[in-house]
Structure formats: C-alpha cells, structure tokens
Amino acid sequence: MFGNDKTDNAAAPEPSTPEGSSPSFMFIPHELEIDGRPELRNLPANVLFAKVGTNAGVPVLGSALYEPDLASLDFSGSRCTLTYKNTHCGDGWVRITYDTDSRTWEGEKSVGGKVVWIAFGADWKQFFTQLTLLGLAKGEGCVMESISEESSSM
C-alpha cells in the first residue's frame, strides 16, 4: 500500500486538494498502562497525527507520533497532566490533562513554539477525535511515506 520511500524528520506534507485542505485521519489511542499506576489509565499511551498530501509532487502520508515524557507527569488537585513529545523533532509536544472531579480531558498541541490546536472533551473517543482531527500542522516534524499509485486505484 505504501512505497518504500520513508523520510524521517520531514516537515508536514503540503495540502494536495485545490481547496487547500487535505484528508486527515483521527486516531483513538489506547490507555497508558503502567504496572502499579492505575491512575494513569485516563491518559493515552501515545498520540498520533496524520495527513495525506504531496511532497515534491509525490502523494505522501505524513505522520507524527508523540510519546509520553513521564518526567513531565504532574498532579495538581484533581488534575493529572502529562506531556507527549514528537518523536521526529524536539520542539513539538502535546499536553493532555485529565480532571478526575469533572471527568474531562483537555489537550493542547504545540509546533515550533506555538500552540496550534486545543481540544476539550468529556468522552475518550470524542476528545481524541477532536484533538487529532486536523492532522499535521504546517512545519510539524513527521515521517512521510510515499503512497503508491496501486493503492489509489483499488
């Protein structure tokens, strides 16, 4: 389905549709499971963003994976906050907060030192759908994989 051309530490692909937007994918992560730490199950194991676009005229799927930085774990009252770092560049992060009293999530995504997206939700699926809805932000570090022509004809 994907070609072998894989590029690490690339910038997000340029939009491929005339309207200036391209298909993004929403991802619902698994819960973070660490033995002896059941309170962390309200946080995701990781966060993934993806978008289809073009790179030098070639159709690509760009994806950015954010992994938890357990050293950033913070408990403040009923709020548990964990920052996730972009595995493809050092300056991208996603911060997720779960409030046990209100049973709600808050999330913000930063790329290039600027917050580019904020989401809120009272339901796991709804929250992560909203958080990952826009896919990659312009300039976000990602991996790009060529999409073969064969997959588009199926």
Image: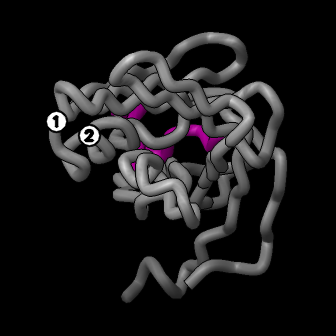
* Circles 2, 1 touching at the beta carbon (< 8 Å): yes
- The quarter of the picture where residue 123 lies is top left
Q: Which mark is residue 127?
A: 2
Would you say the magenta stretch is mainly helix, strand or loop? Answer: loop
Residue at (46, 32) in percent of width and height: 96
- Image quadrant where one finds the N terminus: bottom right
Amino acid beneath label 2: Phe
Amino acid beneath label 1: Ala
Q: Give the mark, 2 or 1, whose residue is nearer the N terminus.
A: 1
Residue at (41, 31) in percent of width and height: 20
Mark 1 Cα shell of 10 Å, populated few (<14), some (14-19), many (≥20): some
Give the percent coordinates (x, y) of residue 55.
69, 49
Q: Viewer-nearest of labels 2 and 1?
A: 1
Is residue 19 depicted above or below 70 in this figure? above
Give the percent coordinates (x, y) of residue 118.
38, 21
Mark 2 Cα shell of 10 Å, populated few (<14), some (14-19), many (≥20): some
Q: Which of 116 and 104 is in front in this view?
A: 104
- Image quadrant where one finds the C terminus: bottom left
Give the percent coordinates (x, y) of residue 66.
63, 46
Whether residue 18 is visible here, answered yes or no, is no
Residue at (39, 42) in percent of width and height: 132
Of all residues shown, which one is farthest toward the front?
36
- Look at mark 1 in the image and give the residue it sits on: 122
Whether residue 62 is visible here, answered yes or no, is yes
Is label 1 in a helix, a strand or a loop?
loop
User: How far apart are the alpha carbons under marks 2 and 1?
Assistant: 7 Å
Give the percent coordinates (x, y) of residue 21.
39, 36
- The quarter of the picture where residue 91 lies is top right
102 with respect to 86 (left or right): left
